[in-house]
């Protein structure tokens, strides 16, 4: 195969150096983070004799279709002493009636209500703050109203992850396995993001957590002034709080099959992109060190594939490029397979490779363009 006309020897060398640099960056993060997560212990935490009482905090807004099933699984956790606080954030469906009916059978269920205000528009952070302040226990565990725990040991595993130095525990939130390619793409995107933030947390570079499976101490929340430092931002009750308050030593992860949570995935590409827009918007407010790390990871991915594909048309470097591509793919597949096993993600392996290309070169650019052109929606309407 002959070099393309635009491929001068010097340009080919520059592109080859870029490819090697991007591959070296990937290997660096594999060594310090991804391998630690993929090959780390998968055993559940050793049971403690004296489990501290815990408060589960949930915000609900128009969740009548899910709340009874999901909340029952939370209320029936195998845990000695805990309360479940549900903040009804201005629901106009039958959510309040469902909650009151559940409360009759579960005394540990504590209900709070925020009336919808036509003048003052508030977000999820206010509802969470009210729930947190009303919690009577130090250990706070969070799950969304449209989510449910994978097992009756979810709460136990989350709280047992705390030690004397831990202020924050990060969990993994999966999406239910459904039919269709969109479901597989959603789950692969979730797995990739989960593998990244859990791996970087193990390396002392915590940058986010997810509100559908998260825990922290109440006293720590108050010490950090709650959500006040980013109260002007509608979203970010989970990732911005973690990004601001996490250190190299105060975060641990709870990442076994028994302590994950499940959510119902979006059923259309339009709905999913809208959800992704809301999630990605807050990353612009991360601290500089996090943005630098994520920028290095993201841009090295783009430049790797651009350089790799173009070098396939260079007679001088095509076989070396093929070898580097093969090495990258093999390492990535091994990491993802290990992550799937650890997090209970089933039947995704065949989608591991092509999902990266769709996410990098289609979905993420579409989301970035949408965020530039259109106003972001509220946390739930």
Image (spheres, rainbow, N blue to C red):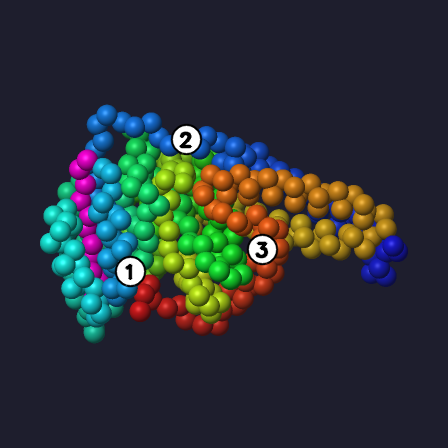
Q: Nearer the viewer, mark 2 or mark 3?
A: 2
Q: Residue at 21%, 27% (x, y): give it.
A: 50
Q: Are marks 2 and 1 in contact (CB under 8 Å)?
A: no
Estimate how packed mark 3 is, as few (under 14), some (14 to 19) or many (20 or more) residues with alpha carbons within 10 Å: some
Q: Is residue 380 left or right of residue 286?
A: left
Number of other residues with Cα within 10 Å of mark 1, as a class: few under 14, some 14 to 19, many 20 or more? some
- Image point 41% across, 38% down: which residue? 256
Identify the mark nearer the N-term, 3 or 1: 1
> In the image, residue 2 lies at what x, y percent?
88, 56
N-terminal-most mark, 2 or 3 = 2
Q: Could you say where residue 340 lies in the image, as x and y percent from the top left?
A: 50, 43
Helix, strand or loop under label 1: loop
In the displayed orientation, state which residue is furthest to the top.
Answer: 49
Q: How many residues crowd around disc 2 within 10 Å: few (fewer than 14), some, or many (20 or more)?
A: few
Question: Could you tell whether 240 is left or right of 96 in the image?
Answer: right
Please state the horizontal and vertical placement of residue 251, each as a whole percent of the image.
Answer: 37, 36
How far apart are the two marked residues, 2 and 3, measured between alpha carbons? 29 Å
At numbered mark 2, what does the secondary structure look like: helix, strand or loop?
Answer: loop
Range covered by the magenta-colored residues? 80-90
Sequence-wise, the earlier of marks 2 and 1 is: 2
Q: Quadrant of residue 202?
A: top left
List the residue tagged with mark 2.
Answer: 43
Residue where numbered disc 3 is placed: 355
Name the residue that disc number 1 marks: 66
Is residue 82 inside the magenta stretch?
yes
Q: Residue furthest right?
A: 2
* Secondary structure mostly seen in the magenta stretch: strand
60 on left or right of 261: left
Element class at badge 3: helix
- Residue 95's place in the image compared with 162, above or below, is below
């Amino acid at each position: 195969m002959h070099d393309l006309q635009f491929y001068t020897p010097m340009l080919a060398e520059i592109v080859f150096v870029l490819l090697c640099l991007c591959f070296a960056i990937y290997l660096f993060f594999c060594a310090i983070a991804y391998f630690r997560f993929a090959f780390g212990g998968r055993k559940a935490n050793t049971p403690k004799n004296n489990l501290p009482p815990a408060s589960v905090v949930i915000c609900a807004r128009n969740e009548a279709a899910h709340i009874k099933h999901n909340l029952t699984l939370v209320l029936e956790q195998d845990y000695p002493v805990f309360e479940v606080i549900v903040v009804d954030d201005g629901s106009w469906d039958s959510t309040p009636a469902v909650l009151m009916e559940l409360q009759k059978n579960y005394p540990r269920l504590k209900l709070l209500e925020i009336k919808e205000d036509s003048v003052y528009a508030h977000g999820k952070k206010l509802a969470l703050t009210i729930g947190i302040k009303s919690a009577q226990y130090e250990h706070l565990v969070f799950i969304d109203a449209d989510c449910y725990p994978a097992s009756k040991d979810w709460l136990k595993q989350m709280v047992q992850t705390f030690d004397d130095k831990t202020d924050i525990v990060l969990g993994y939130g999966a999406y239910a396995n459904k039919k269709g390619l969109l479901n597989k793409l959603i789950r692969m995107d979730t797995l990739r993001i989960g593998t990244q933030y859990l791996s970087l947390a193990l390396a002392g570079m915590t940058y986010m957590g997810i509100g559908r499976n998260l825990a922290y101490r109440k006293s720590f929340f108050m010490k950090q002034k709650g959500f006040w430092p980013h109260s002007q931002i509608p979203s970010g009750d989970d990732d911005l709080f973690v990004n601001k308050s996490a250190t190299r030593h105060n975060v641990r992860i709870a990442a076994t099959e028994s302590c994950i949570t499940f959510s119902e995935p979006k059923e259309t590409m339009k709905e999913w992109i809208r959800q992704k827009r809301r999630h990605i918007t807050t990353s612009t407010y991360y601290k500089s060190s996090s943005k630098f790390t994520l920028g290095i990871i993201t841009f090295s991915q783009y430049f790797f594939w651009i350089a790799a594909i173009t070098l396939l048309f260079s007679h001088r470097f095509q076989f070396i490029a093929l070898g580097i591509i093969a090495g990258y793919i093999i390492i990535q597949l091994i990491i993802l397979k290990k992550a799937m096993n650890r997090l209970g993600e089933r039947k995704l392996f065949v989608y591991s490779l092509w999902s990266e290309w769709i996410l990098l070169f289609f979905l993420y650019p579409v989301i970035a363009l949408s965020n530039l052109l259109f106003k972001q929606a509220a946390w739930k309407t």
